[in-house]
Amino acid sequence: MVTGRRALGWSAGLMAVYGVVRLLPGSRDVGPGWTVGHLALFAALALMGAGLVELWRLGGRASRWGRGWLAVGWAGVAAGLAQTGIDLYANAVSADRAARSAVFDRVQSVPGVRPLVYDVVPMLLYVGLIALLVRLALRRTAPWWSPVLVLLGTLAMGASLDYLVVGAALYLAAFLPVRGNSVVGTGRPAVPSGA
């Protein structure tokens, strides 16, 4: 089972897999390319949820702020998983892109679905992730540039899904220096505060 910091690395890696598959010819049509890419994305999101727990743990479990940011991030993960699940279902039951679009239209016409699953709540993943990394940077359990790289990766992916691989690489670079038991670069124990 992948846990802790490894979950973050695997999450970034699977996000890159989704990004590469998305760029292949035919991958946006109904068929196996769409399925493989979205299964990689689903796994990436699930592992990101586990990674958020690790970031919260490293920043100190006693903090209300930490629990709040973890909850915010989890809300985003849940919305992303729901969206990806809908994508997988729509692909599985559709004969072509027009039929798949019709499934999306039906789902998105349900009141509340767009903000909860597509437009607003999924963004909370990135808010929670960056906030938890900022907490670690303030404690020197992660370098200051880790949350900056995640922000840049998020902006790249938000600009175009064609930059998913770039965003995933930035995420991986941000996650690699996060340490479990010491202050980055000193070897001294990290002492969590209540922030």
Image (tube, helix red, strand yellow):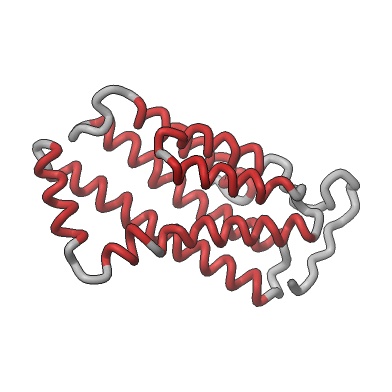
Which residue is found at the position 52% from the left and 46% from the top? 155
In this rendering, would 36 be left or right of 127?
A: left
Coordinates of residue 183 in the picture (x, y in percent): 84, 52
In this rendering, would 80 be left or right of 175?
A: left
Q: Residue furthest front?
A: 159
Which residue is found at the position 68% from the left and 40% from the top? 176
In this rendering, would 100 be left or right of 137?
A: left
Coordinates of residue 178 in the picture (x, y in percent): 72, 47
Which residue is found at the position 29% from the left and 52% from the top? 85
Q: Residue 132's image quarter?
A: bottom right
Coordinates of residue 107 in the picture (x, y in percent): 18, 59
Numbered circles on residues, count: 0
Q: Relative to 108, say whether 1 is above or below.
A: above
Coordinates of residue 187 in the picture (x, y in percent): 89, 47
In this rendering, would 183 be left or right of 59?
A: right
Q: Residue furthest bottom?
A: 64
Tell me the quarter of the image containing the C terminus.
bottom right
Q: Residue 55's image quarter?
A: bottom right
Q: Relative to 178, say whether 19 is above or below.
A: above
Q: Relative to 68, say whether 186 is above or below.
A: above
Q: Nearer the viewer, residue 96 or 59?
A: 96
Which residue is found at the position 15% from the left and 46% from the top? 101
